[in-house]
Image: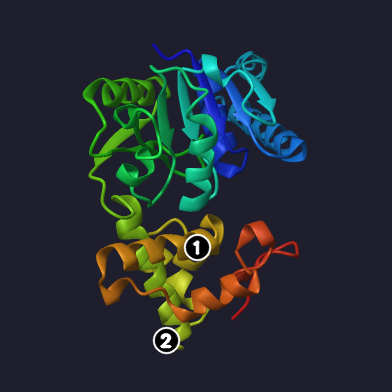
Amino acid sequence: MIRKIGVIGAGQMGRGIAHVCALAGYDVTMVDISEAQLAKAMDRIEQALDRQVSRSEIEPADKPAALSRIRTQVGYSGFETIDLVIEAATESEELKRKIFAEIRDMLKDEVIVATNTSSLSITRLAATMRHPERFMGMHFMNPVPRMQLVELIRGIATDNPTYEAVRELVFKLDKTPAVSEDFPAFIVNRILLPMINEAIYTLYEGVGTVEAIDTAMKLGANHPMGPLELADFIGLDTCLSIMQVLYDGLADSKYRPCPLLVKYVEAGWLGRKTDRGFYDYRGDVPVPTR
């Protein structure tokens, strides 16, 4: 039975996962390499809970109860008692493998380990663990507290009890699971990221401006957010990483990352998190950069 959850990573995804798990009544240990990052994450969680209270999505008493269930720390002290580990570090296979190598020998045999990867091979990541049968993908959508979907991805070794336990947890978090096979980028990003990449090609080739492309897709396809605005929200480095996984994994030229996307990432223009991407966020109102 899952009672204690360890979340590795206190960035946008990690803090969102910690938030929904604590709100659902689970004891959460959130880990990062920086006390400053952990403090920032707790501030953001508190702000998100305040918004939920103001919208009457949760009761006022739910906020302090959820916050009291989240413990933060640098390092993995106490992880030997954790029932479920959810890794939510940066989308880098090298980093994720390093994390799994650090924790695998301290975890109890019956622990379930899940990765929030949005594109990487679950089977390959599971091979780093002592018990690959108790490892699977659990891809939350961003922002976690508001998005309903969780993609569930089994590796080749994932057993049925692990899958059923994680699926049950998704329902307890008031989310909806969608099962994907272990193919590059799974379902959502297999469809979404090529669309974003094509929007960037449309900009790169001069077919339209940033504003024109986003307006066209919002008003012409009824998308709530334009693809370039969405790319900035996701993070252009993450977009590039997923496109590279698709391009390398499927060996199809239609997944080739747009050179403009590569150039923006090389410049450090990663979107909202760096205040500059396809929009400039340094003023009161985002301004298209092209």
Give percent across and percent down for residue 206. 46, 88
User: Does any portion of residue 155 appear in the rendered image?
Assistant: yes
Tell me the residue that label 1 is attached to: 231
Can you give x and y, in whole percent of width and height, for residue 207 in the image?
42, 86
Amino acid of disc 1: Ala
- Count the labels in the image: 2
Residue 103: percent from the left, percent from the top?
52, 30
- Relative height, residue 124 to residue 184 (above, below): above
For marks 2 and 1, the one nearer the N-term is: 2
Q: Is residue 282 left or right of residue 278?
A: right
Q: Is residue 211 in view? A: no
Residue positioned 59% across, 35% down in the render: 15
Instruction: Give whichever of 97, 248 is nearer the camera.
Output: 97
Distance in Å between CA atoms under marks 2 and 1: 18 Å
In the depicted view, which residue is nearer to us: 6 or 211? 6
Up the image or down, 246 lies above or below 34; here it is below
Q: Could you tell whether 38 is left or right of 57 in the image? A: right
Q: Position of residue 157 (x, y in %)?
A: 24, 34
User: Which quadrant of the view contains residue 251?
Assistant: bottom left
According to the image, label 2 marks what residue? Answer: 207
Mark 2 residue type: Val
Residue at the spot x=35%, y=38% of the render? 126
Q: Secondary structure at mark 2?
A: loop
Q: Quadrant of residue 62?
A: top right
Q: Image point 58% across, 17% down: which residue?
A: 59
- In the picture, measured across the screen, residue 158 lies left or right of residue 290, that is left
- The color scheme shown is rainbow
Against 174, residue 215 (above or below) is below
